[in-house]
């Protein structure tokens, strides 16, 4: 883990990772990078454990974005090679609109 991520890791405390579902310290991941307007807002930030964050950057895990599932905001993701799972009550994200 690089030094910058260690600092984030120490700041975040522990919570359940939305990918591996383990209760671990979380790091910040910007879904669309930092070169977009309002890059620090909720629509562009996902918190995950350092291991899952590394898998995202290795492109083993694909983050689809924040989706609405039965009225709740949920991080949509899939493993490399898997199909996107769609179902009733799932609404795709509205990028950059600060959707919650």
Image (cartoon, rainbow, N blue to C red):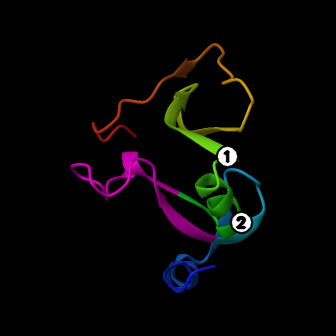
Quadrant, the N terminus: bottom right
The disc at residue 35 is none
Find residue 89 and report its image quarter.
top right
List x then y, in percent, for residue 75. Answer: 57, 42
Is residue 29 or residue 12 the one in the foreground? 29
Quadrant, the C terminus: top left
Q: For mark 1, give the secondary structure.
A: strand
Picture layout, residue 88 above or below residue 97: above
Residue at the image position 56 percent from the left and 69 percent from the top: 27
Residue at the image position 66 percent from the left and 15 percent from the top: 87
Q: Residues within 10 Å of mark 2 (few under 14, many from 20)?
A: some
| Residue on which disc 2 sits | 51
Residue at the image position 57 percent from the left and 81 percent from the top: 2
Q: Range of the magenta residues?
A: 26-46
Q: Is residue 1 magenta?
A: no
Find residue 26 and report its image quarter.
bottom right
| Residue on which disc 1 sits | 61
Picture layout, residue 80 above or below residue 41: above
Find residue 55 and report its image quarter.
bottom right
List x then y, in percent, for residue 98. Answer: 30, 42
Sequence-wise first label, 1 or 2 = 2
Image side of residue 64 versus residue 49, left or right: left
Picture layout, residue 71 above or below residue 65: above
Q: Is residue 36 magenta?
A: yes
List x then y, in percent, for residue 69. Answer: 58, 28
Q: For mark 2, give the secondary structure.
A: helix
List x then y, in percent, for residue 84. Answer: 66, 24
């Amino acid at each position: 883990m690089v030094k910058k991520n260690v600092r984030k890791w120490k700041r975040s405390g522990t919570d359940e990772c939305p990918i591996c579902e383990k209760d671990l310290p979380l790091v910040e991941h910007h879904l669309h990078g930092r070169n977009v307007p309002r890059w620090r807002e909720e629509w562009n930030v996902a918190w995950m454990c350092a291991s899952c964050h590394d898998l995202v950057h290795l492109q083993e895990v694909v983050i689809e974005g924040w989706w609405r599932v039965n009225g709740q905001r949920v991080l949509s993701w899939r493993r490399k090679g898997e199909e996107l799972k769609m179902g009733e009550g799932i609404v795709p994200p509205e990028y950059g609109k600060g959707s919650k």
